[in-house]
Every structure is written in structure tokens, then in C-alpha cells.
Image (cartoon, rainbow, N blue to C red):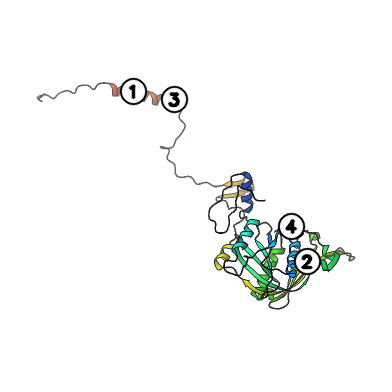
Amino acid sequence: MQPEDATPLVPGQTKLVKAKTRRGKRYLESRAPKAIEDAKRVLFLYGNQTSQVIKDVVTDLYQLKRLEAQKFTRKNENVRPFEPGGETSLEFYCNRNNCSLFVLGSHSKKRPHNIVIGRMFDFRLYDALEMGVEELQVIRDFGAAGTGAQLGNKPCVVFVGEKFESVPAMALAKSLLLDIFRGETVDNINLAGVDRVVMAVAMDDCRLQLRQYSIRFKKSGTRIPRVALTEMGPRIVFSVRRYRLPPSDLQQEAMKQPKLGKKKEKNVSSDSLAGKVGRIYMPKQSMDTLGLSKYKGTKRERRESAREAAEARKRPKAAEPVAEGASTE
């Protein structure tokens, strides 16, 4: 729930929003840019028309990201990422729900069973990829194997095929899928917590297959267990249709990396004996103008000399003698 006193920025708004309450301040700080980002949230929504296939795909993908996702159940007529002006409502929804990724499902006669996956930067549409669903097996079709993984664990993501490196549309699909499934960025991970594998296979230049397997560790007679994979669903075959690359200026802005680490201190070194040693530079000093501590005796002498000078100024001046033969007129 959003606080009333801390309204976030909407697309096109340039006015800086200031928090009036502590709750609003905490909310704005959570939405501010960070050097190390949180886990990316995904917004799942439907277009103007949908099909049962699209509903099953969106539902299964939402189950894989349920802890870091938001799902809309109603239809949205004005969300068209590949049309001019059609991304305005999508940017607004992502901003309101703090989602940097989105999955849009729609269905039409021209593009049946259509799925659009895209990213946001600063709540502006960055890039998008449109794919069609050719084959589908949902999680419930695999029975008890579909519950073989724990929700929230980081998966092992595997991409098979050199097309993910050579074909631009497939490279974009690899980047988007990796952003969706990677979760929160961590320094190390416990291998015992890796309980599922997400595998994407490039079938040709414009088709890819997405599968998910659960991991089971079994006895092998040695210290290293035997790894057994069991398919748990969903199994989806996508065909790549349209894609939208980011503008050059927006891409340059998004690729900026913050400078992390401690700032180097100048003129500071370390010594094994003295520890931290610093070097300072002093200007040339003059003893005449240098302010030193004055003793009481010198202060008394200054007061007496000042008193004598004041008395001398108060005395009347003596008449000067007139030279002989000079006129007094």
C-alpha cells in the first residue's frame, strides 16, 4: 500500500516529490536508485483479448516468480508496447507497482497466443521481445513432480545453443529470461539450496524451448552425490516474432556503472611501527606576524605604554620660540 504523503513520480513528471512524513521518506528511499539493486519485480498482465493458452502460460510463469511479482487479472486495452504511445499505460503500471520487468499476454487473429517480455529503465520502456506460444505443457500436467522445488530458491539457468550469441533476437531473449529468473544478486550461494534448473534451448534462429527440472541428490557411494533431474514443468516452445531494441541514448544512460569502493586518501600511508601516518603541508611562516601566547608581564607593559601615549596626546603643546629679527605680525 502506498502512503498518501509520498506520491511517486509518474512518467512525464519533472517536479521533485518531497516526503512529509517518516513513512513517506522511507518509501521514497526504497524507490530511489541503489548501487546494488534489489531483486527485479515482474508485472504480469493481459492485453485486450486473451486465450486459455495465454492464461496458462502467464499463470505458470507467475508461479515461478510469485514472491517477486505482481499480477493483474483484468484486461488492459491501451497496453501496446510496439505501437507509438502504447507504452504510456504500461510505464504507469510498472511505476505504481515498482516493477522493472513485465510479461504481457494477448491473443488476436494476426498474432495468436502472443507473449511480450520487456524491461524498464527509470520506468521508461527499455526493450521488448514478442514471442508466440507454439507448444505448451503446464505444471499441473507433470503431477507431483511439479512441486519438487521450493519457492524462492535461486535456480540454475542453462542456455543451450550458439544462436543465443549470434542472432540478435535470441540474444535479447537470453538477456530477458536471465533477468526474470536470476532473482536477487548475491556473493555466494549454498549448493544444497539449488533445487531446480531452468533450461532454454535454441532450436533454430527464431524458435526456443523453455523447460524446468527439479534436482535430486542421490547416493553414489562417494562423497559427491549423484544428481538426478526430473522435469517439473512448464514446457513451452516459443517462436520469436518482433523485438524492440533500446535507443542509443537510453542504453548509454542505463549502462553507467557507479564507482564503488572506498575513496583513496591523499598523503596517507601506513607504517608497521607507527600505524597510520599522514603528511601535511604548511605554508612558510613569519615569526613577526605569528600569533603567539602573550605573558602577563608583556600585557602590563603594553597597557602602561598605551596610557603614557594617551596622556601625551592630552597635554597642551609648548609655544615655539620666535627667531630674532622675525616679525610677529
Image spot of residue 179 (x, y percent) = 68, 64
Q: Earlier in the sequence, mark 3 or mark 2?
A: 2
Residue behind mark 1: 308
Q: CA distance from mark 3 to mark 2?
A: 89 Å
Amino acid identity at mark 2: Val
User: Which amino acid does the dot numbered 1 rest on?
Assistant: Glu
Labels 1 and 4: the sequence-earlier one:
4
**Residue placed most toward the observer, 80 or 281:** 80
Q: Residues within 10 Å of mark 2 (few under 14, many from 20)?
A: many
Quick one: SS at disc 3? helix
Instruction: List the residue tagged with mark 2.
Output: 197
Which residue occupies the extreme bottom position in the image?
204
Which-is-in-front pick, marks 4 and 3? Answer: 4
* Viewer-nearest of discs 1 and 4: 4
What residue is shown with label 4? 67
Quadrant in which the C terminus appears: top left
Q: Is residue 60 left or right of residue 24?
A: right
Neighbor class of circle 3 (other Cα within 10 Å; few <14, some 14-19, many 20+) is few
Q: Give the CA separation, mark 2 to mark 4.
A: 18 Å
Q: Residue at x 73, y 65 (%)?
A: 58
Within the image, what quadrant is residue 159 found in?
Answer: bottom right
Up the image or down, 260 lies above or below 325; here it is below
